[in-house]
Image: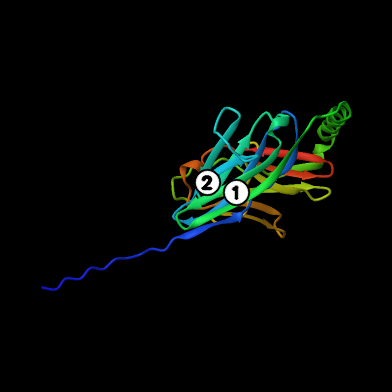
Amino acid sequence: SASSTASVIVEGVSPAFIEKPEGGTCQLGDTFEFCAVVSGIPEPDIYWKHNGAPVRDDNQRTITSETGGQYLLEVKDLALVDAGKYECVAENEAGQASSTVTLVVEEATLVDTLRSMESKKDVAQTSANIKFVEEPKSQDAATGDTVTFTAIVEGNPEPVVKWNKGKWRQIKNYGRVKIAHDKETNKHTLTMSTLDKPDTGMYRCIASNASGEVSVQF
C-alpha cells in the first residue's frame, strides 16, 4: 500500500522595527517613556536593556505591550543612575533586531527651576490664546469597533495638536490608528479601529503654540 504525507512549512519573518524608540533629555524626578513598534512572525519576544543589563519590571520601571506590535518602557522618578544607553531587543525563531538610544538625566539648577516657574506662570496667563471650539468626548465602544474623536481648536499662532494615551504617551499614526487634520473644517481627528481592551483608558488632546498649551482630558 502507498501512503503520502504532506506538511505545510510556514516560514518565519525576522523582527523589524516599524518605529524605533527615541531617546531624550530629562530632569531629575521626571518620567520618560520609550516606545517601539515591532513586526515579525511569529510575534517577537521583546526585552529591554539599560547599559547592557536587563531591565526588570518594578515600581519604577513599567514594561507593557499593546495591540499593533507596540512595546513600551516607562521609567518614573528619574535619578542620575537611570541615564545611559537603553536597548530594545526583539527576537523570534527567524532572527533578532535591536535598537539603542540614549537617555540624558540632568540636575535642574536653581536658574532652570526659576525659569520653569516663570514659564508656567506665563503659560497660565496667555493660554487663553488657544481655545477648544469643539472638545473630544468620551465614547463607549465594544471590542472590534471603530471610534473617532474630534477636536476643533483656534489660536494665534495656529496651535499644533497632538493626542496622548494617559498623561504622557503620545499617540502616533500607524496601523489601525489614524491622526488627521482637515484644514477646510479645521477638524483634528483621532480614529482607532479594531478596538481591544488595552485601548480602554483616559486620553488627552493637547494644543500648543508659542503662547502656551491647553489640553482636554476625555
In contact (CB < 8 Å): disc 1 and disc 2: yes
What amino acid does circle 1 point to? Ala
Q: Which residue is mark 1?
A: 36
The answer to whether residue 192 shows anywhere in this view is yes
Residue 146 makes an appearance in the image: no
The three-letter amino acid code for the residue at tag 2 is: Ile
Decide: few, some or many residues near mark 2? Use Cα within 10 Å; few <14, some 14-19, many ≥20.
Answer: many
Residue 21 percent location from the top left of the image? 64, 48
Is 18 on the left or on the right of 105, as rendered? left
Q: Secondary structure at mark 1?
A: strand
Residue 90 place in picture, x, y as percent: 54, 50
In the picture, the disc for residue 181 is none
| Quadrant in the rendering for residue 53 | top right
Extreme-bottom residue of the structure? 2
Q: Where residue 196 sits: x, y (%)? A: 47, 46
> In the picture, which quadrant includes the C terminus?
top right
Q: Which residue is mark 2?
A: 46
Q: Is residue 205 left or right of residue 38?
A: right
In the image, is 15 to the left or to the right of 122?
left
Q: Residue at x 80, y 38 (%)?
A: 128
Q: Looking at the image, which residue is at 55% across and 53% down?
A: 38
- Rendered position, 175 above or below 130: below
Which quarter of the picture shows residue 31?
A: top right
